[in-house]
């Protein structure tokens, strides 16, 4: 949400005064919680982002159709990924892009092809572990079921059973005394299968039949599914001063939300037609398991969209090369805030704090794509937006994670900078961030996209 004089672009894409900075405030963080609750799967996340972009004047284009060179906002949806871009009136075929990137997926429990199972009078759902979740955080949580159904007629249907449907029960301490001394040890196959009812008869098709009926479909209409569990507890402010946010899937829907809001804001400004760059949102699926898919950052989606945008405006391969050479991407993904109980796990001179501003992620072994020139780009955006930023590097004795930034840089030859928001409990079913960091990130992204 913007300041009272500047309504939120997600809610009302009103025009703004020429070149005046769009400033998001704590209302943006409240809107983040709405976005999280509406996006229990990557498919819901991109649908929610698309809906907000539509309100800002964007229109969907199909990959199977010819594209024209018209100006304005456009987007492509493919599975759990979205690429959106705004072509200003000032654009030439070789105009560079300014890209804000993120990923839509989060670690969770996903339904197997034959989901119906059970034993000893309990009905269970067979699930597979997606990504690297903190398994213990999924125990004794009330879980819903969401995702998409593929139908016999070739269409797909989003589904969200957002109530307490499943639960992974933990073993009582009376039967596992060793957990006190040795810690909790979970077998992914044996211990993570949720229950969803009682009964001795397990019948193939029961779960999908139930989901189909919830959607008003005949069981025979459903020929495929991509379903996953999610916690039904709503996101909320936390703390004495409500200066924290607790919620699911902040890694990395926090970034998807900020990127969407920033693109909508920039494209609805009065001076949007004279932007020096083409602002782009690229939100990919499958980052949590390596990004190697047709909707992942290591797939062809982003490159295809950018090239077609150049060629549809009458550009040549030379124009494409010139545009890519001048392009910069801010890859936004959550990072680690300093943990008060485990501060020794962090680099001793880099302790990102909640509400300290977005983080610049650096790793000289290219687990992050940031270099000195990229740092300068991000520093300039933060200075223009009037927000502080922090630096993050891993402790030398600890392995460093990675994200879509290095993949984007290597695959497309695009200057890429890895940034994000510092959080606690990453990959938990419920993560924690400062309540001001999301809108500070969005402010920086607006400044970056404006150029």
Image (spheres, helix red, strand yellow):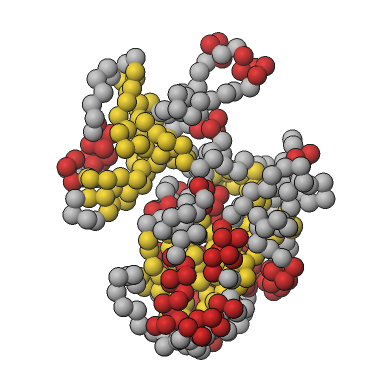
Whole-percent x, y for residue 355 in the image: 69, 53
x 23%, y 45%: residue: 223
Q: Which residue is found at the position 36% from the left and 43% from the top?
A: 227
Q: Is residue 1 above or below residue 197?
A: below
Furthest residue toward right: 349
- Position of residue 311 relative to residue 205, above or below, is below
* Residue 84 appears in the picture as rendered: no
* Above or below 141: residue 8: below
- Locate residue 333 relative to residue 197 in the image: left or right: right
Residue 195: x and y, percent? 38, 26
Horizontal relation, residue 308 to residue 335: left or right: left
- What residue is rendered at 54% in x and 65% in y? 411
Q: Is residue 278 left or right of residue 197?
A: right
Relative vertical location of residue 342 with respect to residue 281 in this rendering, above or below:
above
Which residue corresponds to the image point at 61% horizontal and 18% vertical from the top-left? 179
Q: Is residue 203 at least partly visible in the picture?
A: yes
Residue 273 rendering spot, x and y as whole percentages:
50, 85
Q: Nearer the viewer, residue 361 or 433?
A: 361
Nearest the viewer among 160 and 367 is 367
Position of the C terminus, as image quadrant, is bottom right
Residue 1 found in image quarter = bottom right
Q: Position of residue 142 (x, y in %)?
A: 44, 32
Q: How many labels does the image show?
A: 0
Asked where in the image residue 204 lies, by quadrant, the reply is top left
């Amino acid at each position: 949400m913007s300041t009272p004089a500047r309504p939120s672009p997600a809610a009302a894409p009103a025009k703004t005064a020429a070149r005046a900075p769009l400033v998001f405030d704590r209302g943006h963080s409240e809107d983040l919680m709405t976005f999280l609750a509406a996006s229990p799967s990557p498919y819901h996340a991109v649908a929610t982002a698309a809906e907000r972009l539509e309100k800002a004047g964007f229109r969907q284009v199909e990959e199977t159709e010819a594209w024209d060179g018209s100006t304005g906002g456009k987007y492509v949806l493919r599975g759990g990924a979205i690429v959106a871009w705004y072509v200003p009136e000032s654009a030439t075929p070789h105009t560079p892009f300014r890209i804000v990137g993120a990923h839509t997926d989060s670690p969770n429990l996903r339904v197997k092809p034959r989901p119906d199972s059970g034993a000893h009078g309990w009905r269970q759902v067979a699930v597979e572990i997606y990504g690297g979740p903190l398994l213990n955080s999924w125990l004794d949580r009330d879980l819903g079921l969401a995702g998409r159904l593929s139908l016999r007629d070739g269409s797909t249907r989003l589904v969200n059973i957002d109530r307490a449907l499943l639960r992974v029960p933990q073993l009582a301490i009376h039967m596992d005394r060793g957990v006190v001394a040795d810690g909790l040890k979970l077998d992914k196959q044996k211990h993570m299968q949720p229950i969803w009812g009682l009964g001795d008869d397990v019948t193939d098709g029961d779960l999908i039949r139930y989901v189909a009926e919830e959607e008003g479909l005949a069981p025979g209409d459903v020929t495929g599914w991509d379903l996953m569990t999610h916690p039904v507890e709503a996101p909320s402010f936390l703390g004495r001063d409500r200066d924290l946010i607790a919620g699911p899937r902040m890694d990395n829907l926090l970034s998807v939300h900020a990127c969407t809001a920033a693109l909508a804001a920039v494209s609805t400004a009065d001076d949007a037609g004279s932007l020096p760059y083409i602002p782009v949102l690229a939100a990919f699926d499958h980052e949590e398991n390596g990004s190697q898919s047709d909707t992942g950052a290591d797939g062809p989606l982003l490159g295809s969209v950018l090239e077609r945008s150049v060629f549809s405006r009458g550009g040549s391969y030379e124009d494409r090369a010139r545009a890519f050479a001048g392009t910069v991407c801010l890859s936004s993904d959550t990072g680690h805030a300093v943990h008060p109980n485990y501060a020794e796990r962090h680099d001793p001179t880099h302790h990102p704090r909640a509400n300290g501003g977005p983080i610049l992620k650096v790793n000289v072994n290219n687990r992050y794509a940031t270099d000195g020139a990229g740092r300068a780009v991000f520093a300039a955006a933060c200075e223009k937006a009037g927000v502080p930023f922090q630096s993050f590097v891993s402790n030398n004795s600890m392995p460093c994670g990675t994200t879509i930034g290095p993949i984007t840089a290597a695959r497309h030859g695009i200057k890429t900078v890895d940034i994000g928001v510092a959080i606690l409990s990453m990959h938990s079913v419920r993560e924690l961030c400062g309540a001001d960091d999301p809108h500070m990130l969005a402010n920086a992204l607006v400044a970056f996209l404006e150029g």
